[in-house]
Image (cartoon, rainbow, N blue to C red):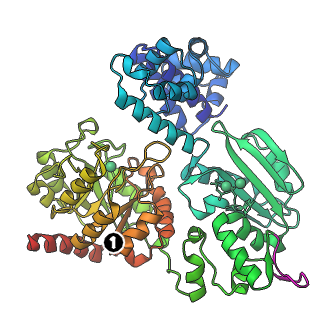
Amino acid sequence: MDNIHVAKLLDETADLMEIAAEDGFRIRSYRNAAKTIEGYPESVMTIVADPQRKVTNIAGIGKGIAHILGEIAERGSFDRRDEMLEKYPPTALEMLKIQGLGPKSIAVLIEAFRVSTIDDLERLCREQKLRDLPRMGAKLEEKILKSIAIYRRSAGRFLIDFATDTAEELRVLFEGLAGVESVSAAGSLRRGKETIGDVDILVAGPNAVVALDHFAKWSKVEELLAKGENKASARVGVEGIQVDVRALPTENFGAAMQYFTGSKEHNVALRTRAVKMGYTLNEYSLSRESDGKVIASATESQIYEALGLVWIAPELRENTGEIEAAEKGVLPKLLELEQMRGDLHMHTRESDGRGTLEEMAAAAKAMGYEYIVITDHSKALAMANGLDEKRVLDFAKMVRGIGENELGLKVFSGIECDILKDGRMDLDDEALGALDFVVASVHSHMNLDGSAMTERLLAALENPYIHTMGHPTGRVLLHRDAYAYEFEKVAARAAERGVFMEINASPERLDLHAALIRSAKARGCKFTISTDAHHPRQFVNMCYGVKMARRGWLEKTDVVNTLGLREFEATIREARALRLSAV
Ligand code: DGT
Ligand code: CA
Ligand code: CA
Ligand code: ZN
């Protein structure tokens, strides 16, 4: 059993113990152990099995957890977990995924109505039964119904970083097999869509079918769904993500890549165009209708060119104007990951991050960056130990004291300052003015009505010290929808004020999404792309932010942190000076 699976058993048991309102200390010890095990570089089960070694040598694994790990090694479960599973249906775990429903409420609902499924829960809310219970009301019923809708919509979809890692493991598995020449992801993953339904992998070569055999025998396959002559599908890993692997000869690779990359809408439009030109287009080739002669099949470029188009980047293939632009030769020269020069939103141990300033700087340097901005939280986020004015001033002074080459790249002082309910900033002007760069974000009162939220954000934009709007819609993928407001109005005002829009590259957010990026650009906005890293290893998420930017048709010149250090420094200073002189 791999570490992720072991961690999941512990976490689930902790969830059930929470529903049972058990001792918080014990629950926390399960959770901490789960976290440790999930991030541990070596298989914990291997250590358990080795009589020469002790799992208790791992920091955070005590005797109690070690005993549990022994049970898991023996029979794949442990007493405590079995007890809890007897007491509560496994669907209780599913209900915890519904926002607004904590373990306490679930315990009450199970007690009062014996609810055991999401369907039960939905019915109870519709029949307005929850409002009769203590501390529950009509508002909660409404909130739960909304969360159930989000849950249903997102069930069976996965975050892009997880899907990317799965695809990468398969690439490593297939590449180098005799008879395999190329391996590539297709589908929504290749288009860089923010969530992924299933992972599509294409394998080409004179004997590409060997990949299907290797796939079917892969240790991570939980359930083989189908295996045919040139395709295999399986559910993979504890999470059960579906993977489709297709094998084909090299001469069809381009046509297959084009077909299986999609989107469906793009393909329909392209096929219509082919038919008008007297061709047929399918996963094997672009061919002449009259005599079946193959016009193009080996590469995507050949296919697009034969259709009178330049090659269209996968991120653009959503049939939102890309075919027309390719025909006219006016596709954007899309932003590239290598063009990013810095990261402008990150947290350290000063607030809720896991690394020190030095550790973050070292990891950013390894990304090849010239500069970073440290942006811990402001005081309104008390839970995250946000900074008050005094700590901000001390921090700004400390950062100014760092020598030019001391950390190998320039570190700017910054803050992720909360936008309060009325649109004021959480820190006074003196503190904000002492910092080089300010990200302004909403973290509270996210359910204001649309017009109040619009007013709130417009008010925030009047503050002369802020540089960028952090995660501008507040969505959390698969969990929370964007908060409601008039985005166009806010974007237009941001453009006037010279305040940038952030594209938050965290795979859980990817906020802004493509359509909003295009809308903001049309209104004159510039953008920052940042990872919001809470750990040194999260800087690599920049690639997902860049994908989002590309899906929003952005070029290098649209993105502020593609600038070299001196230009970037001048830009953020001048933007603020301009706003101050306009006051
Ligand atoms: P997903 O998996 O829901 O995140 O989204 P996709 O786009 O990866 O969808 P998927 O896996 O069903 O199919 C991959 C691509 O293959 C899709 O974008 C277009 C193409 N494709 C697959 N089946 C069909 C089909 O029956 N008709 C058409 N036109 N295209 C298809
Ligand atoms: Ca797919
Ligand atoms: Ca698929
Ligand atoms: Zn934030």
Q: Is residue 427 left or right of residue 550?
A: left
Reply yes or no: does residue 336 show up in magenta.
no
* Local SS, label 1: loop
Reply above or below: 383 against 201.
above
Disc 1, ligand 4: is the CB inside 8 Å? no
Residue 572 pos. (x, y %): 23, 70
Residue for point 43% across, 57% down: 505
Using the rendered image of the protein, determine whether residue 562 is visible from the camera's viewpoint.
Answer: no
Q: What's drawn in magenta, residue-wise?
A: 284-296
Residue furthest to the front: 127
Residue type at mark 1: give it: Lys
Using the rendered image of the protein, determine whether residue 264 is visible from the camera's viewpoint.
Answer: yes
Residue 117 pos. (x, y %): 58, 25
Residue for point 76% across, 44% down: 234
Q: Is residue 160 left or right of residue 284?
A: left
The residue nearer to you, when weighing 548 against 353, is 548
Which quadrant of the structure image shows residue 518?
A: bottom left
| Quarter placement of the C terminus | bottom left
The residue nearer to you, when weighing 10 against 40, is 10
Tell me if mark 1 has few (under 14), some (14-19) or many (20+) residues whose alpha carbon lies within 10 angstroms of its own: many
Check disc 1 and report the residue beneath it: 526
Reply above or below: 198 against 122.
below
Residue for point 14% across, 50% down: 427
Residue 425 pos. (x, y %): 17, 52
| Quarter placement of the N terminus | top right
Residue 144 pos. (x, y %): 44, 32
